[in-house]
Amino acid sequence: MEVFEKSQTIDPEVRAYVYSLVSAIGGASAADDGRYVLGDDALACLKDLRRWLKLYDTKLDRFDVKRVLSEANLVKGDLLEILGQWKEDDETNVLRRKVAVGSLELLTELTWPLVLDGEKATVNHVRHLPVIQLAQVEYKRAILHHESESILHKAIAAAVPAMTTPRKERSAREEGIINLMLFLFRNVIMISQPPNLPSSGNEEDVSRSETIHALQQQDVLQLILTICSGMGEDFDGQDVIILELLFHLLKGIDPKQIFQNDRQVVNDKMADFKKALQAEKSMLSAQARNAPTRHNRFGTMIWVKQSDDKISTLTGQDTIMNGDGTLRKMDSTKQWNRPKHAKRDSQEGSSDFAPVSLDSRSRAALKTFISDFLDSSFNPLFLHLRRALEREPDRVKPDHARQFFFLIAWFLRAFTARQTHCPPPQSQDATVETPYAYIAAVLTQETFVLLNRTMQKNLDDKSYADVHTCLLAFTQIMLTVSAMSESRNEDDQEIAENMQARLFYEEQTHDRILAVLRGYQEGRQGLPYLEACTELAHVFIRLLERYSKVNVDMFVRSKRRARKKAKAKPKGGATVEGLEEDVQTVPDDGADDEVEAHKEVQERKFDFSRFAARFVNEASVDTYVALLRRYRDLDEEQLKRCHRFFYRVAFKMERVILLFRVDILELFQRLIKGPNGLDTKVDRKSAVFKEWEELVKQIFRRCIKKVDERPQLVVEMLFSKIPNTLFFLEYGYEKEVIKAAPRAPAEMEIKPGMDHLAEIGVAVGALINQGKLDALAWVKTVLNNAVDERRSWEDLNVALQEKTADSVKASPLFGDGEQKTGETQEATESVETTSKPEEAPQAPAIVVMPDSEERRTATFKDKHLRLLLKTLALQRLGANDDPTANWIIPSSLTATQLEDDLDAIRKFEFDPPVYENGKSAESFIRSEAAGRRNAYEKEASDDEGDSDLDESLFVPGGPTVRPDDPRPEKPKRKKLRRRGEEITEEERQARAEARKKKEKEKDAKVKSTLFVTESDDEDDDERDAEFFKREKERRGKAADAVKAALMDGRTGHGEEGASKKRKSVGESKPVKKRKTAMFEEESDDDEDVVDAENVEPMVISSRESTPADESDEESEEASDDETPLSSQTGLKDVDVTMEEVPAAKTAEVLRPTSGNEQRQRVDSDDEDEVVPIKSSRRSNRPVFVVDDDSD
């Protein structure tokens, strides 16, 4: 029957061929006293078996060959015997080494762990997998307890030649041999007794303790330390294999237990045993209170008829003992057919956290290994693994990230346990490295970034098994940093301060912790996940509160959704690491007004009370309530965490109203009063029980007080509470919601360069592209009604004007053939005046009435609709931010204009305009602010590029050195204008251009002297002679002018002026205005407006001057001494113009001028020719004006 079953399970030909290959490998020899002897073609048979496994099992996805090999006893009968008899120090026997390597390959393949995939499983998988799993358990038992006790050591010997080869010189085969060895170790560690299959031997033989002992005895742990310490230098691709090996070696082991001595372990076990006895005692005492006696052994059945005529049946005498017992009995009989959800992977990997007990021998071996690993191998391995997870996705599997963060949490716990139970000796030497340097590889910013990114990705994918390991790692990192901050070493404290600042700086981290706590769903995540998320929340808020108290000016980087215009990224702008939603850049072709939602990154001051308010809410309370319901499975530390949370809710945050729920109050009551309360878990005299008892008492006291104040709370206890209900129950009135005033959208405009018809096309095209045809139809209706109304008014106005004109003409004032009187003439003029078009009556404005509230809102918020209305010359009344303001059609728009605009809208509605280069209508629209900004930037760029303006800002030859004028500056006189006809704007611009051209030519002459060569410094006699000749001519002309002025003063002008002056002193007569005359010059370079201060006449006093005149003359002579006459520019023409004026005005106008002022006036290049002021003639003070024509 067995042969028949085999033939039905596996193809007989496959079985026969595989059996023949196994027999040819070798066997026990009677000639050698039963020792194992290799066959002649043992190496070829091993290769053939490997091909069968690869081509039949792997490619066809079948387990037939593996099952046949397990039945043929290949592993225990052949492979282990070959490795056990091989002498690794015999380097001459190359064949035996090759056979050993071949056996290693087959052994690794046959011990490879198999997992049944429910989606891809076939009939063969389900049929063969249990047999193969039991066979692998036997393989592990044989490997660990082989008589040679060196199978694992022989595997190391097979890979030693490959490991001793430098990494850069290794071949692919040598790398494969090293990987085979490590995979064999991993497989041996992973194999365990299947829980749903019967055991064929002692399970202790394949336990974790026996595995660790064998690894330590056969030098596997020392090899792992060697490979990890050389990771990145001597080894590269073995990091992920070591990761899997360590994960399966350490999972389920409590790190604290490793570093405890035997006495501490025994004490802990005794404490656990006492707790179990206490729980049993409490359970028996609770049962004894309701236990049946010999007098109540009779059966009882009770029918309860409810209000809806439904009948419930209860059995047993315990239903009539008391009211609470009856209710509990009724509750226990209720059944709820809970909906069954599809199985998720939320509890996948929960077996990884099942506790594993170790014996003293394995604990000692593991303690030595972990200590050496932390000291020498932790940083190299985890640094290399982090880089592989970030940069080499082809080598990394999805499970590797989970295993990476689990090992981070495990080793940090082990490091803390070693610091607690085996503290290092305190050294005063500053050169001694701090113990925290051994784990520095996982306390870097790169690790924090990878951890946050992985956690967020797993949360988004709802991969809660991976989130669980991330939570464990995050919690242990924070606890380690907190321990560093309490270290005696100042360097450790400084590093811890820096790491805390990085952990708490990102507000996204705060939000993620809150999301994990709030997102727990009972029934979809297991108890380990619940414990991890609540522990992380407890540690995070405790450390954050402590840190915020120490650092009062704490800032966090927050990312909020904001409405902001998308702009091109500025040059040199810095990017924020981890920011995934970057601001999109748009070209500056008119689309700069597009508004997009993005994450706005900014720093803000952190407020812990604000964060705590977000931490305490309904979802967080539900998570902790779910944990507290399992109080029988919690230890004292977890109970304390629950107590701290509810204390924070009720008293620190004053949100006790969240706890006033029937299910929560019932849980608190049962926790203290029972039955099966907290006293079954801990002693009533313990501190934990007393703390919970006091907390529950205070919560119930506040609940009763609040019910008296708010009777509505009795009803609200049945439901979860929304924020408005919480506010009402807390304060007794509804929360006032203040709505922010609506903001008007940005005013839009059409880019310049288009006519009115094209602008309408752009506005209509934008509405059509956005699908707002209903708004366009409404605009057409408004215009159509406005055309009719405006045309009716215009016709009525014309008729009224004609009727008025006819009535005036028909009046008696108009006679037939008679001469018009003055009254008739005035009437005619009045009629003509009223008939003028500029004084015609204005049409009344038409108010645009929206057809609905949505339309009114659109006229306020829709920027493109507002643009169309503005393009049609409609006006908006009221404030810009008033949503109820109305639009009007102004009086200036005629019916014809409105009709033309309406026709244009109808045209573009069915034939939208098409623009070049495929541009849309929106590309021609921009905000008014952008238009003003572009105009300002253009003007600024034009100013920067205007070389003419830059040249005219400063004197071309550099600053001119002049002596200081101590006299106060006199007020400027009014500008004088020529009498005559006004010039046109074209003539004004032509004159300005000609003047600017002449100035540039003059500046060029001056600038040419700035650029000289060495030869220019030499003396030039001809040039000097010419210069002195010109100076001599100028002095001569100046002398002749002075003489002519003096002679003119002696001919009688001075006496006349003197007599008039004396007369003016004796008599008080009204003063006449001074007459000025402007001379029109033939030159086109004259300006229309001439400053009187620039044409101030040069005054030369005569001998017959008054004492005041003498003082003026003295100051003039002193000024002339400072500036010689020869140094003044050429005086070519002298015009002397005088007019008799009163002495007061003469003294005011004709004042003495210093030589400095003369030089400033004559040397000024602001005017080509100086226009003199025609002043009154004064006695003995002739006046003349010198025109500079030297240029």
Image: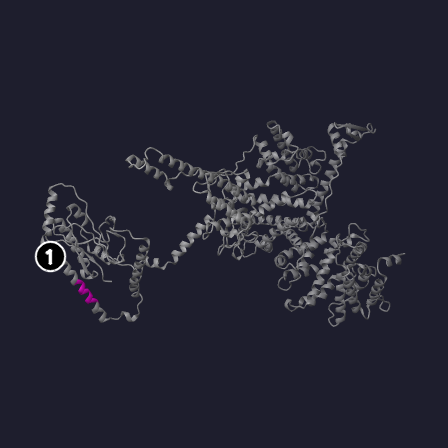
Our reading of the magenta stretch's main secondary structure is helix
Q: Is residue 795 above or below residue 1031?
A: above
Is 358 situated left or right of 934 in this image?
right
Figure quadrant of residue 852: top right
Q: Quadrant of the C terminus?
A: bottom left
Q: Is residue 597 visible?
A: no
**Residue 36 at x, y percent in the picture:** 82, 66
Q: Quick one: SS at disc 1?
A: helix
Q: As rendered, which of 1063 and 545 lies closer to the eye?
A: 1063
Q: What colouring style does the render use?
A: one colour
Q: As rendered, which of 35 and 164 lies closer to the eye?
A: 164
Q: Which residue is mark 1?
A: 1047
Residue at 51% x, 40% y: name it. 785
Does residue 52 belong to the magenta stretch? no
Does residue 1029 belong to the magenta stretch? yes
Q: Which residues are magenta?
A: 1027-1035
Amino acid identity at mark 1: Met
**Residue 218 at x, y percent in the picture:** 72, 60
Figure quadrant of residue 285: top right
**Residue 457 at x, y percent in the picture:** 63, 51
Q: Is residue 408 above or below residue 1064?
A: below
Q: As rendered, which of 335 and 502 lies closer to the eye?
A: 335
Residue at 70% x, 41% y: name it. 633
Question: Few, some or many C-alpha atoms within 10 Å of disc 1 (few <14, some 14-19, many ≥20)?
Answer: few
Taking the view exactly as shown, the residue that stands out farthest to the right is 1
Q: Is residue 737 above or below residue 1136?
A: above
Taking the view exactly as shown, the residue that stands out farthest to the bottom is 92
- The number of callouts visible is 1
Figure quadrant of residue 321: top right
